Amino acid sequence: MADPRFFDRAGPFTLAELARTSGARLWRAADSDKLLHDVAPLETAGADDVSFLENRKYLAAFRASRAGAAFVDPEMAKAAPPAMALLVTEEPYKAYAVAAQAFYPTAPVAPGSAPSAVVDPEATVPEDCEIGPNVVIEARARLGRRCQIGANSVLGAGVIVGDDCRIGANVTVSHALIGARVVLHPGVRIGQAGFGFAPDPAGPVKVPQLGRVVIGDDVDIGANTTIDRGSGHDTVIGAGSMIDNLVQIAHNVVLGRGCILAGQVGISGSTRLGDFVMIGGQGGLAGHLKIGTGARIAAKAGLMRDVPSGAAVCGIPAVPIADFMRQTAILQRLGRKKDGR
Amino acid sequence: MADPRFFDRAGPFTLAELARTSGARLWRAADSDKLLHDVAPLETAGADDVSFLENRKYLAAFRASRAGAAFVDPEMAKAAPPAMALLVTEEPYKAYAVAAQAFYPTAPVAPGSAPSAVVDPEATVPEDCEIGPNVVIEARARLGRRCQIGANSVLGAGVIVGDDCRIGANVTVSHALIGARVVLHPGVRIGQAGFGFAPDPAGPVKVPQLGRVVIGDDVDIGANTTIDRGSGHDTVIGAGSMIDNLVQIAHNVVLGRGCILAGQVGISGSTRLGDFVMIGGQGGLAGHLKIGTGARIAAKAGLMRDVPSGAAVCGIPAVPIADFMRQTAILQRLGRKKDGR
Amino acid sequence: MADPRFFDRAGPFTLAELARTSGARLWRAADSDKLLHDVAPLETAGADDVSFLENRKYLAAFRASRAGAAFVDPEMAKAAPPAMALLVTEEPYKAYAVAAQAFYPTAPVAPGSAPSAVVDPEATVPEDCEIGPNVVIEARARLGRRCQIGANSVLGAGVIVGDDCRIGANVTVSHALIGARVVLHPGVRIGQAGFGFAPDPAGPVKVPQLGRVVIGDDVDIGANTTIDRGSGHDTVIGAGSMIDNLVQIAHNVVLGRGCILAGQVGISGSTRLGDFVMIGGQGGLAGHLKIGTGARIAAKAGLMRDVPSGAAVCGIPAVPIADFMRQTAILQRLGRKKDGR
């Protein structure tokens, strides 16, 4: 079970309740009244826990699991141990996520401002917000309802934050308009001046960075990620986008809706992504590119050119993924031939 | 126009004034008294705004722009819409930068210390400095005139900061000597102990890190970038260097004057860069290398060897850029041949 | 010598004392009473300083050095200038480290809490801890003896910290159990929710992250590094592991004992490392991999597959290092041939 020092659990729930909430269906109707008390990984789950199998890499763990129940794809159901009750669904991970949210609902905001918070008299902070110790909220900043601002975070002058946002500790935000239900993890930096200067023999001439960062609803931004404000246009993060830790997003970058950026991705200035673009860890994009809707950019890729909608690219410089795999195979064969292996 | 919640605008200025300030020349003398009220990108500029064209990728936007005026290279002037006044110059981006600085001058420092700032009695903080809430300045630290220290930043014991520095929020500085007019963006970490230890079967033996970070005048360091202090020698950042976000600079690294490091670059210990070296995003340099003056290291490059002055390198491991392009072309051809395409 | 504004020096020590402490042996017995006052790099050391030669790249500096004494491998001893006293050992860097620790011992903790620290009444903070200004320690957190917590750091509810830990400024820790003698450099983020969600057309469904971060004894974690808590299992950092700056460690990752991760490494979710694994700078590992004990992963590598114990891999995708070097050599030759060079 989750460590009670850190997590508060709800429940128990019957399998029928979990099936209804998650949209999965019971494999054996006789299990419907079985009570589940917690969620747990396959390896550590016991008779009172519900678990899940999503990745075939964990099939052996599934076969050996003592979980009382599990979410599983119908194709995998026959691999289950006999005592395990099954909640079958084509999307076992999503169904598990919903069940886990039932057992561990997000703690409600605890309204009130820590005495050490420094809130400018011209700022707007609704009474149902939770403002942590040493938080600084500057003039004319406006928070929505039920926002939570973690200790030692700084919201700069004029920043707008929508309802139900959760901003972690040690975060810095300036020059930004933020939607509803946005999550900023600890150490995020939003809205600082981007890398804008014109070269000159006497030293670089700085270009005033006059845009903002505009973040849509339901965006999640990982720890220590940095998003610079636009230089003239805005930097835009589309609604529902998920951004992992230590990602760098330069000025004027536009992300469409539902983009997914893994850890340590870097996007150079003025590159525009359509909706639902996915970028693997440590992927890097040059500036001024256009990436079409649904494009997938592999981990470690180095992108120099535009990518059409739906394409998948890989490598440095990035090429279509089938080409990359062929190049890799040939190179590996050449390497071996040389030795006569 | 720039969002007035975040930016204060000066002006208006006549085209003649903008030409004089920026060093551009008026294409049509008749436009000299035309008043401009703001700067704006080509796509959003109106009749009162001055814009610029630098990158040919935006030529279509230039042709379609309603900007009242624009900075442009003389070669591009004939592509301008008829109503647009032109300020011609071989360096339109730099001229625009100067004009934008006129419209949006850096806000002056607001002298004074927030009541919640914790300044050691042995620290030296001139009265014309602006010290934000919860700032911590430790013993014997010395700030120059007109410095601005953002909320929740920490300047460690003995740190020296020159005149007119701007240090953002949530920054940490220790063991450092910093020049004048240096900008540290939010979340920068300067002066912590570097990655120094000697391997041993009983566990790594830590090597005391006894150097400093020495930062020249007019350096700009991006958000969440980390610069470790030297282990014996100093870590040195040459005057006028521009460093983007999430860059890692290890102990004893030396940057010459005017180096430009894009986002997520990493430089391993004791590597030395000459003046005006440029490194593209996510470039990585091994330790103990010497990089000559004016060398250019491409984005994503992995550098294992010294680079002579003026050379341009690319790839992993990095090779001269012409070799890299040839390798890439051959590999791509081989990849296609295999399929008979 | 180290800048006295930042470092307090002990000593002097005789060569005999340094030999005894470090396990090196004196080359000439006649030097045993020679007094050394400081450590210094070869290039700047004088007659009162002890230095070291480890890397052959610095052999010229060794020959020219005015250091009064140096740690050196017996094979290199004959290259020393005549006046230099020698402390010979097969591990000169480690011996130097021990000597440097004698000259510059870690400053003891200064017990007491800054008045501006916000310590929850339900937290446990021994009186011999040093709690910096604006530190926030939440309910039920427990610190060990003699811990030092830097200014503006935040320890979340329930966090456990062992004895003699040094936590830098602006650090955030939540959902974590931390061993003894752990060092967290400034800006480290430990324990935030990882990148866990199930895709859905209506927007990603977040998966509650119910694990912890468990950090063993004697771990060192670099500035602005991020370690997410587990999703169900824990994220585990084995005892004695050294992690450099700006590293990303995703949920459920397990590091064995004594792993070494250079700057900007990224490890994706649920990947497990054995003991003593080394990863070079900017190396990236896909998720759900198993890396055997003592494996070495080169800088910049992109790892897609499991790695057996003791193997060394390189490249994107990573292959055994001999294969990588052969591939690289062939590619470079092909590139040159095309031009008839």
Image: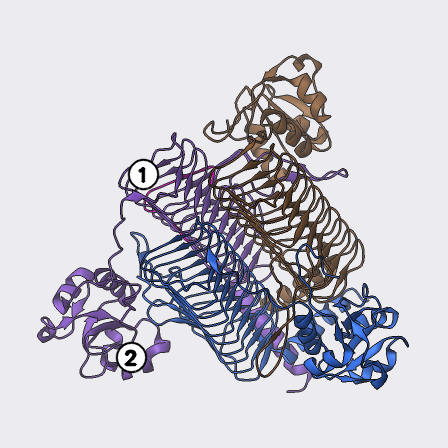
Chain colours: A purple, B brown, C blue
Q: Which residues are magenta?
A: A174-185
Instruction: Give the labeled residue for mark 2.
Output: A62
Q: Is residue B128 above or below residue C152?
A: above
- Of residue C106 and residue C319, the one placed in the foreground of this image is C106
- Which image quarter holds the N terminus of chain C? bottom right
Q: Chain letter for mark 1, please.
A: A
Query: Quarter of the image containing the C terminus of chain C?
Result: bottom right
Q: Where is residue A321 shown, x and y percent of the image?
A: 51, 64
Q: Position of residue A288 (x, y in %)?
A: 57, 44
* Camera sees residue B26: no
Q: Is residue A112 above or below residue A232?
A: below
Give amino acid for label 2: Phe
| Whether labels 2 and 1 share one chain | yes
Left or right: B93 in relation to A237: right
Check disc 2 and report its element: helix, strand or loop: helix
Q: Residue at x 71, y 14 (%)?
A: B29
Q: Can I make out residue C302 in this image?
A: yes
Q: Residue at x 48, y 74 (%)?
A: C217
Could you tell which of marks 2 and 1 lies nearer the N-terminus?
A: 2
C47 left or right of C201?
right
Percent position of residue A71, x then y = 24, 70
Q: What mark, if any, has residue B222 been given in the picture?
A: none
Q: Inspect the image, locate mark 1, and give the three-letter code of the amino acid beneath it.
A: Gly
Is residue A182 part of the magenta span, yes or no?
yes
Question: Neighbour class for label 2 at 10 Å: few (<14), some, many (≥20)?
Answer: many
**Chain that bears disc 2:** A
Q: Which residue is mark 1?
A: A144
